[in-house]
Each structure stands twice: as structure tokens, then as C-alpha cells.
Image (cartoon, rainbow, N blue to C red):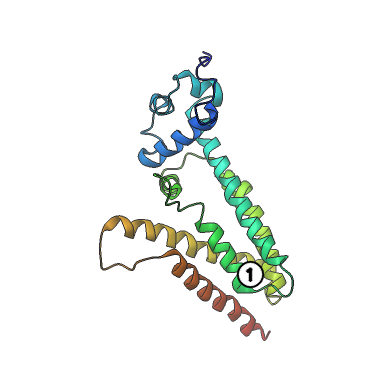
Amino acid sequence: MAASSQDSRNDNSGQSVQDRLIDVAEDLFCRHGFNETSVRDIAAAADCNVASVNYYFGGKDSLYLEIWRRRLVQMRESRLSGIEKVMSAGGQPSLEDLLRSHAVSFFEPLIEGDRQCKFISLMAREMIDPHLPREMFVTEMVIPVMTAMSKALITICPWLNEASARVVILLVVGQLIHTVCARELFEGSGSTELPQLKLDDLVDHIVKFSAGGIRAYGNQSGA
């Protein structure tokens, strides 16, 4: 069934039907999860007929994939751009600057105070109840970013080899993921006994902790 002619027009803001469906679907998936969000829910929220989801995306599964594909492109390009900026700034690039750039570019797309639905909610749901192809994260995010970050780390810290640089990256990313999840959990608890996790402070701590650990490799090797 084809989408109606009304669906094919842009809305008053000039947003296309495809973009409108993606935006409202992401919001609904964040709030309710993949299984609890129906095509009818998405179409109603986007002010489209039900056939529009199939017409433009081929179904709910493909729409979900498109949401993630766009997000992964944004996150990947942000991280790669941050690495390139540090390494091409002139002079000797700083380990702290590289780590800070990576942390900031990691946090920014996941925590969005100006949106009703934080993307981290969707990421958390996907980790618990996966619906994406396993290789999607690896090919579209992990390998490109790890390759660029590893090269940058070895340039700044020549005592690291490729294997140790990749392990270091995994450990840094582990801190970032855990911190984002903890911040989300703590904010939702309402407890006054838990630490107040401000992003700027978190970045400072992660950079200091990670830089110290990376330099310890050099101390062990006599660098």
C-alpha cells in the first residue's frame, strides 16, 4: 500500500516525512522500547498513515536500523573529527587533549538536555534487549574509531604498541560507558547520598585517571 499524498508532503517546518518518522520513532523507542512501540504508534505520532512506515522504510525493523545508522554516523564522525583536530593542531599533541576530545565527543551525542528523550535510554535498552545486527557497531563505529585513536595514541605515546593501544582504548571507553550509565541511574534515583555527576568534572577525572594509567605503560618499559 502506498503512502497517501498528504504523507508525501513536508510538514510546516519543512521536515520530510522520512525525517519526521525517524524523529518520533526514536522518541517512542527511547520511552517504551522496541517491542512496546507499534507501527501504529509511530504513524500516529508522526501524523502519517500506517502504510507510511512500510512505504518509506519497509517496516519497523528497518526504521529502527535507520535510526541507529544515522546516530552511529553522527557519533563516529564526531569522534574522528575530534581526533583529527587534536593531531593536526600543530606542535606536539597532548595525551590529555586527545583523551579529553574523545571523552567529550563520546558524551555529547548521548546526553542531550534539550531533548525529551536521551539517546542513552535507547542505547541502554539495546544493550539489554538487542535488535541490531551484532556486526553493525563493529563495522560502523568500533573499527574506524579504534583505528584512528590507536594511531593517535601511538604517535603521542611511542612506548605503546598497537595491541596495548587497542586495550587502552577499550578501557577508556569502558570508563565512559559506565559513567554514562551510572549518571543516568543516579539521576533517576532521587538519592542525595550518591555523587553528583557533572559532565565537566567527569571528563576531568577520566582524563586524569586514563592519562596516569597510559603513562604507567611507559614507566614499566623504561620510556
The residue depicted at 60 percent of the width and 79 percent of the height is: 215
Q: Position of residue 145 (x, y in %)?
A: 64, 56
Q: Secondary structure beneath disc 1?
A: helix
Answer left or right for 102 relative to 122. Answer: right
Q: In the displayed image of the protein, which residue is found farthest to the bottom? A: 222
Q: Position of residue 132 (x, y in %)?
A: 51, 40
Q: Nearer the viewer, residue 197 or 60?
A: 197
In this rendering, is residue 44 above or below 197?
A: above
Answer left or right for 159 relative to 48. Answer: right
The amino acid type, in three-letter code, at marker 1 is Ser
In this rendering, is residue 60 above or below 150?
A: above
Which image quarter holds the C terminus?
bottom right
Q: Nearer the viewer, residue 6 or 209?
A: 6
Q: Position of residue 80 (x, y in %)?
A: 65, 56
In this rendering, is residue 155 above or below 104?
A: below
Q: Nearer the viewer, residue 118 or 213?
A: 118
Q: How many marks?
A: 1
Q: Position of residue 161 (x, y in %)?
A: 69, 71
User: How many other residues sit within 10 Å of disc 1, few (<14), some (14-19) or many (≥20)?
Assistant: some
Q: In the displayed image of the protein, which residue is found farthest to the front? A: 12
Q: Nearer the viewer, residue 64 or 127?
A: 64
The residue depicted at 66 percent of the width and 69 percent of the height is: 153
Residue under label 1:
164
